[in-house]
Image (tube, helix red, strand yellow):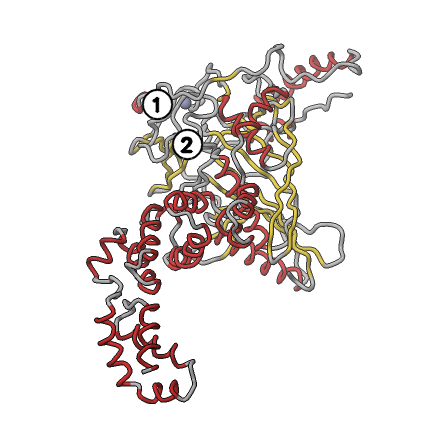
Amino acid sequence: MKVMKIDETMVEKVAMLSRLELSSSEKEQMTEQLNDILEYADELNELETEDIEPTAHALPIKNVFREDKVGESLARKDALKNAPQKEAGSFKVPQIIETDE
Amino acid sequence: MLKDYDITIGLEVHAQLDTETKIFCSCSTEFGAEPNTHTCPVCLGMPGVLPVLNKQAVEYAIKAGLALNCEITDFSKFDRKNYFYPDLPKAYQISQFDLPLCEEGYIDVMTDEESVRIGINRIHMEEDAGKLIHAQGGESLVDYNRGGTPLIEIVTEPDITSPIQATAYLKKLKNILEYLEVSDCNMAEGSLRCDANISLKPKGQSELGVKTELKNMNSFKAIEKALTYEIKRQRKLLKEGGKVVQETRTWDDEVEKTFSMRSKEEAHDYRYFPEPDLVPLEVDEAWLQEIKEEIPELPKARRERFVNELGLPEYDAEVLTDSKSIADFFEAVLEEYDDPKTVSNWMMGDMLRLLNEEELEIEEIKIEPVELAQMLKLMDDGTISSKIAKTVFEEMFNTGKKPETIVEEKGLKQISDSSELEGIIEEVLAENQSAVEDYQAGNENVIGFLVGQTMQATQGKANPQLVNEILRKKLAD
Ligand SMILES: [Zn+2]
């Protein structure tokens, strides 16, 4: 499999999805670095994996559970401590409008 | 059913699992708490924390899968679904993407004497998001109490062909989840939520039409109305040569229309990838067996028991088991009054009628099962007539008072004293001379009329059997 080369348009899209604002020099830098990373990861493709089961996790463990018992939650003032804006015991954010225009 | 188009509907139901704690942390899932009092570093998405899966939530999800005839996958995993929205503190939702816990189930649904099998494509587990409250001044307040509540998402195949079928499916699904006690299915509190995909295609065309996704329906009625509206809207568009746009539309219950939710963002790109903080989930045969044994009697089995062991007609059994709460009420009455058909008649007749009229759920009824039993006993021992019983029942329904109290307060005791009745009957006969003559001329049917007149004269309190006896005696004289 050939690695798809990342261009600046894709970097812009990923940045938008991640809500990151990149300057044009940053975009250039990211394009280069992301391509480097993919190229590096691409080395894995040289391995023969035909007969290897797909892995879902890096560790050979499964079924780690908690019992359904209520534990301690944060005090509200602590929960809200990092909030840039708060009101009425809640986090305050700009409204996102998703209805008709 | 449309003459010119085939309707294709698929439903996605989110049901909150009725666990004590959230899916990946030990915060309480209690409804209605003060905002942001049930949060912790895990469900707030602080860096460096580790989610740990709630075993009870998994067992509830498996139970639902089994009861909905699904295959339980022996190996599944969790994935991150990435998107930005303020109700999602991590900017991703932990969900299941390519290896859901349950697959390929179905529910058989009856509409208009026709049984239809609605396929269930998958059931997967995920965490709920927080709640946004829109405040004034273009800002929103976020409460993360609900964030991290365990959900199952139940996705049907596009097998549904009418709004009525859709609601029939939902009622049945809700009923099964309630029987299992894995979700309280309270639509008003949002513990059961439904989105719908709907498209039309010209009759005979095999390829599906362009679909829209409908959101924000908060009751079965709203779902039926939204689907009906959307069918009309799409049909009109198509007939006029227009095209349906693939989009999400929100239902407005007040104006009864769907509206496009055109978001300024680009189309969602969720970039799913395996959740590295959670290890895979394996369900072996022994565990599955354990869970199977915990599954209680389901509606179908209960219905069959009502027919075979209690001797109820099929129809009664169907109606009574249609909701777990109604069936529970019914069986609670039976514990005090062992005549299934009589109890069924009262519940299916007066009780469901009154509940319907008042738009109440059985959970809100003021009558206790034992009180219905008491009322039936009052009828049996002759304290009240069957006619008066209806009045007493309505009063019990409206006020929640005990039947004895109502009979006492309203003076509804049956008149079973023959001397008192004889006097009243004399008067009735005197006022209805022509009927008396008809009877004496051989028309015995007028006896019914005279009984009716006597009942009316006593506001229904006379013992009808006694009235009948006295009348016959007097008319024979
Ligand atoms: Zn928490």
Q: Residue at x 43, y 80 (%)?
A: B445
Q: State yes or no: discs 1 and 2 in contact (Cβ < 8 Å).
A: no
Compared with A33, B430 (above or below) is: below
The subunit carrying tag 2 is: B
The C terminus of chain B appears in which quarter of the rendering?
bottom left
On screen, residue B280 versus residue B437, left or right, reads right
Query: Which chain letter matches label 1?
Result: A
Identified at 45% across, 58% down, the residue is: B255
Q: Position of residue A8 (x, y in %)?
A: 64, 27
Q: Please state, as top left, top right, bottom left or bottom right, where the N terminus of chain B lies in the image.
A: bottom right
CA gap between label 1 and label 2 equals 14 Å
| Of the two numbered discs 1 and 2 in the rendering, the one whose residue sits closer to the viewer | 2
Q: Which residue is mark 2?
A: B146
Report the amino acid beneath label 1: Ala
Residue farthest to the front?
A: B477
- Residue with the mark numbered 1: A79
Q: Residue at x 31, y 63 (%)?
A: B388
SS at mark 1? helix
